[in-house]
Image (cartoon, rainbow, N blue to C red):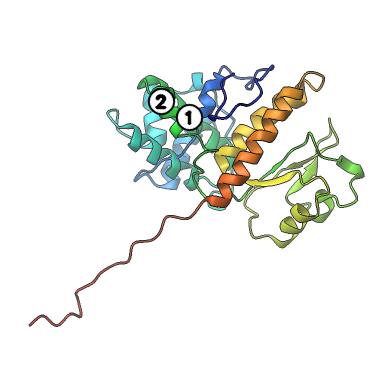
Amino acid sequence: MESLFSFSTPSLTTPLFSRSRSPNNLKTLIFSSSSYSSSSVCDHFCKCNGSDHQSATDEDLSISAAHDILGVDRDCSIADLKSAFRSRVKLFHPDVQKSGSDSMIRRVISAYELLLERNGFGAYEREQLDPFDKPECEAFDLFVNETLCVGKGCPYSCVKTAPHAFSFVASTGTARATSQGHGDDYEVQLAVGQCPRSCIHFVTPSQRVILEELLDSIMSFPFNSSADADYLYSLITKAKFENNRYRKPKRQPKASTDNVDWF
């Protein structure tokens, strides 16, 4: 598999996705803007996915539905697509959208990937949209690197410290973030700080989706995943570095001449 970045990373030996999605599409994850309201987009998701907001594959999306989900015109530019993608991810962030956020973000990503491929944008444009190079927003989503997690025997268990945000996975015994939107939660902050393996990380929504897909492939093939685990670590390291550099867009001051005394 191609590296997401210019530096050298281990090649993956197992498929990243259980769905029919090319690994190169990992480069296309970023977010968008549109005049659509949150409720109208949620309605569209419900129609496409059903009331339970099930995860969708690329085949579930038509070109028309992809444009509707992102709220872009058919002749939109790559800049419009990028802006729309970022806006949608922020719109469906767990802090804003309390229910179904994860499946909605995944469907936004699927729509974004589909339109990138449909419009023939090349590898260079995809690299410019890499969420590990250019985070789309502040990193408040939780991700646990389960390859390093001590599990139930951990003396500083995040599950005990913040049970509303973490739980143990029955099949592996490792901890996993089961709830998002706790960026300012003291117990969550304490759990992150006390982790003896430092395996809990704050990431952006799009980074989390990619990391979760990669982690799933690692946990599915535990005896053939050393290269994948190294690659996961490199992505986390890259995310931490870039997320620490992220700055909110500065709000432009509003100028008013209402109280100016014109002579």
Q: Looking at the image, do the residues carrying marks 1 and 2 touch, with CB atoms under 8 Å apart?
A: yes
Residue projecting furthest to the left: 263
CA distance for labels 1 and 2: 8 Å
Q: Name the amino acid type tagged 2.
A: Leu
| Residue neighbourhood size for the residue with mark 1, other residues' Cα within 10 Å, grouped as few (<14), some (14–19), many (≥20) | many
In this orientation, which residue lies closer to the viewer: 54 or 123?
A: 123
At 82% from the left edge and 19% from the top edge, which residue is drawn? 223
Q: Earlier in the sequence, mark 1 or mark 2?
A: 1
Quadrant of image for the C terminus? bottom left
Question: Which residue occupies the foreground of this view, 81 or 126?
Answer: 126
Give residue 260's position: percent from left, percent from top.
17, 80
Residue at the image point whose x is 77% and y is 20% from the top: 221
Q: Is residue 61 left or right of residue 141?
A: left
Give the labeled residue for mark 1.
Answer: 28
Q: Is residue 221 left or right of residue 37?
A: right
Q: Position of residue 42 (x, y in %)?
A: 47, 41
Element carrying mark 1: helix
Q: Position of residue 16 (x, y in %)?
A: 64, 22
Disc 2 designates what residue?
Answer: 116
Q: Nearer the viewer, residue 56 or 119?
A: 119
For residue 197, which numbered disc appears in the image?
A: none
